[in-house]
Every structure is written in C-alpha cells, then in structure tokens.
Image: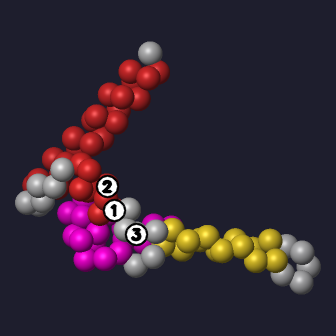
C-alpha cells in the first residue's frame, strides 16, 4: 500500500511541475528536466579546527542559464539554505 501511495505522490509531483513549466512555455520532458537540474551540484567541505571540532560547510554551485530559467518558472530560490 505504501508503494502505491508513493507512486501516486511522485506522479502528482511530476505533473504539477510540468504543468507549472508549461504555463511558462517550457515543454521539456521529465528526463530532460532532471538532466538539466543535475548540472547544479551541492558541495560539502569538512574541516577540523584546533580544538578538534569538525566544521561542515555546504554550498551549492552557481546554476547555469537553463537551470535559472527552470527556477524562475517554478518561483524557486536558486540558492537554497
């Protein structure tokens, strides 16, 4: 039953995203959208200070023009917190 619910949720999310993109005249297929979004990466850096504390810094790379267009169409923040 959980598998069915997750499948329906995924279907709903994909169709919602594609609907919002179509309103902005972006008619890419889902595979193309995913491939485009995978070009932006998150980088995690770990360092240890003098008192043996581990410091973690996580940042996103700059989105390219195609990713920015998708973010703008979906009204998403380009640099998530």
Question: Is 74 on the left or on the right of 7, as rendered?
Answer: left
Spatial CA span between label 3 and label 1: 6 Å
Question: Is 47 on the left or on the right of 57, as rendered?
Answer: right
Mark 1 and mark 2 in contact (Cβ < 8 Å)? yes
Let me know if residue 78 is in the magenta part: yes
The image position of residue 43, as x and y in percent, is: 56, 71
The image position of residue 55, as x and y in percent, is: 75, 74
For label 2, the SS is helix
Q: Residue at x 30, y 41 (%)?
A: 13
Q: Which residues are magenta?
A: 63-81
Residue 16's place in the image compared with 7, above or below, is below
Q: Residue furthest right?
A: 51
Q: Which residue is mark 1?
A: 37
For label 3, the SS is loop
User: Within the image, what quadrant is residue 69 found in?
Assistant: bottom left
Q: Which residue is mark 2?
A: 34
Query: Pointer 3: residues within 10 angstroms few (<14), some, or many (20+)?
Result: some
Let me know if residue 50 is in the magenta part: no
Which image quarter holds the N terminus? top left
Q: Which residue is mark 3?
A: 40
Q: Residue at x 26, y 50 (%)?
A: 31
Residue 22's place in the image compared with 69, above or below, is above
For label 1, the SS is helix
Residue 72 in view:
no
Query: Pointer 2: residues within 10 angstroms few (<14), some, or many (20+)?
Result: few
The image position of residue 63, as x and y in percent, is: 35, 75
Query: Pointer 1: residues within 10 angstroms few (<14), some, or many (20+)?
Result: some
Q: Residue at x 34, y 36 (%)?
A: 10
Sequence-wise, which precedes: disc 3 or disc 2? Answer: 2
Spatial CA span between label 3 and label 2: 11 Å
Mark 1 and mark 3 in contact (Cβ < 8 Å)? yes
């Amino acid at each position: 039953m959980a598998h069915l619910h997750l499948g329906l949720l995924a279907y709903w999310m994909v169709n919602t995203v594609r609907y919002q993109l179509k309103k902005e005249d972006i008619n890419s297929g889902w595979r193309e959208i995913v491939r485009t979004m995978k070009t932006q990466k998150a980088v995690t850096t770990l360092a240890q200070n003098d008192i043996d504390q581990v410091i973690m810094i996580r940042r996103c790379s700059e989105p390219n023009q195609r990713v920015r267009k998708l973010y703008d169409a979906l009204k998403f923040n380009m640099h998530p917190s």
